[in-house]
Amino acid sequence: MTELSIRKAEEKDVSRLNAALRNLSEYMGDEHPITDDTLKDLMFGGRAHSDALLAERDGELVGVCMFAPFISTNLGGLAVYVSDLWIHESMRGQGLGPKLMAAVVDLWGDEAKFIRLSVYNDNPKARDVYLRLGFKGEAKAEFLQLYAEDFKNIRKSA
């Protein structure tokens, strides 16, 4: 077994990255409508500012952490939102998730004030890992989402 390597995703990795994210979507019972072309545009050519870290062993992709910076005005600086964390089933329970999260921390260093993520209610194992890492639930706020099909509600109110 060779050493594990973690590196930032490059444009050439988009198909492999999307395949891993599709695997995560399937595992979580979610749809996965994003195409390789859309992901490529959003990460490397569009307006969005998103990154991903890839964990590889023996040339095989065994983990992905997708994240994006945002500004926290109440803490006065940069924060990072982890949108997706996928670990290949053969690597689960071996500490790869924490290694990927540590790589995100190392990437942003002292610049980031905090890391935010969300965890599905029906995924208690992942929640337990995050709590062991020191993540805390936020009592002051909950995440609400407005989906594109409901953007008309805002437009009507404006």
Image (cartoon, rainbow, N blue to C red):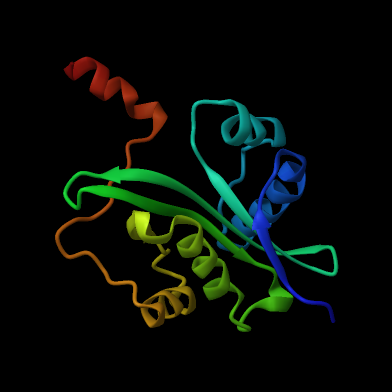
Residue 143 in percent (x, y) is at 28, 51
Taking the image as shown, residue 63 lies to the left or right of residue 145, namely: right
Residue 86 in percent (x, y) is at 61, 63
Check the image and name the residue furthest to the front.
110
The residue drawn where x is 40% and y is 78% is 133
Taking the image as shown, residue 104 lies to the left or right of residue 93, namely: left
Taking the image as shown, residue 133 lies to the left or right of residue 153, namely: right
Vertical side of 78 occupied by 154: above or below: above
Vertical side of 56 occupied by 146: above or below: above
The residue drawn where x is 69% and y is 47% is 18
The residue drawn where x is 33% and y is 25% is 151
The residue drawn where x is 85% and y is 69% is 58
Vertical side of 77 occupied by 26: above or below: below
Residue 16 in percent (x, y) is at 76, 50
Question: Which residue is more in the foreground, 4 or 146?
Answer: 4
Task: State the quadrant of the N terminus.
Answer: bottom right
Residue 19 in percent (x, y) is at 73, 50
